[in-house]
Image: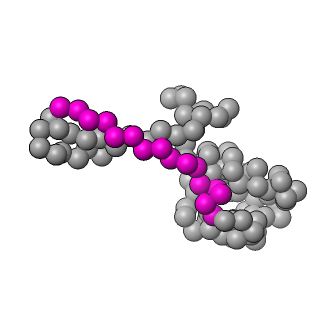
Amino acid sequence: MPVTLGQSRMTLRHDYCNSANMHHNGRMSIDEQVGERVHAAMWRQRRQQIEVAPAVGMNQSTLSRKIRGQRPWSVEEIYRIADELGIDPRELLPEIRLRWIWTAA
């Protein structure tokens, strides 16, 4: 999103953490990162999708697609799954580093 300030233009760019499951641009989507964190939290607790999915209001196949990053996560779903797993919702959200890039107008 460009922001014009006098003669300069400031653009905001997101830099996401890299991991093994990457998009064609070499970076995971936010949905993939959330899914990876949900999967890790479930694994640590020895919880299965078939058990967690109904508790958060979805079926197992939907949860599976979300964990793989094939379907987007809503904020409400992130809060529901964090509550079910007994963790802070912030643990499921990726760190997003924002970088300001200045360009001539």
For the point 63% across and 51% down, which residue is it?
A: 34
Depicted 56 relative to depicted 63: above or below: below
Residue 31 left/right relative to 13 = right
Q: Quadrant of residue 100?
A: top left
Q: Which residues are magenta?
A: 89-104
Q: Nearer the viewer, residue 76 or 82?
A: 82
Which residue sits at x=75%, y=69%?
Answer: 86
Quadrant (top left, top right, bottom left, bottom right) of the C terminus: top left
| Relative depth, front residue between 64 and 16 | 16
Left or right, residue 76 beside residue 42: left
Residue at figure coordinates x 23%, y 32% from the top left: 103
Which is nearer the eye, 89 or 75?
89
In this picture, is 18 found above or below 63?
above
Whether residue 29 appears in this view of the structure is yes
Where is residue 41 shown, x and y percent of the image?
A: 76, 55
Q: Position of residue 28 (x, y in %)?
A: 57, 38
Q: Position of residue 53 (x, y in %)?
A: 75, 64
Q: Residue furthest right?
A: 46
Where 22 sits versus 71, above or below?
A: above
Query: Is any atom of residue 61 visible in this view?
Result: no
Give the colour scheme of this rendering.
one colour
- State the image coordinates of residue 79 (x, y, percent, origin top left): 62, 68
**Relative to residue 23, is residue 5 drawn left or right?**
left
- In the rendered structure, does residue 100 fall within the stretch colored magenta? yes
Instruction: Identify which residue is drawn at 55% across, 62% down.
Output: 74
**Is residue 97 found left or right of 92 in the rendered image?**
left
The number of numbered badges drawn on the structure is 0
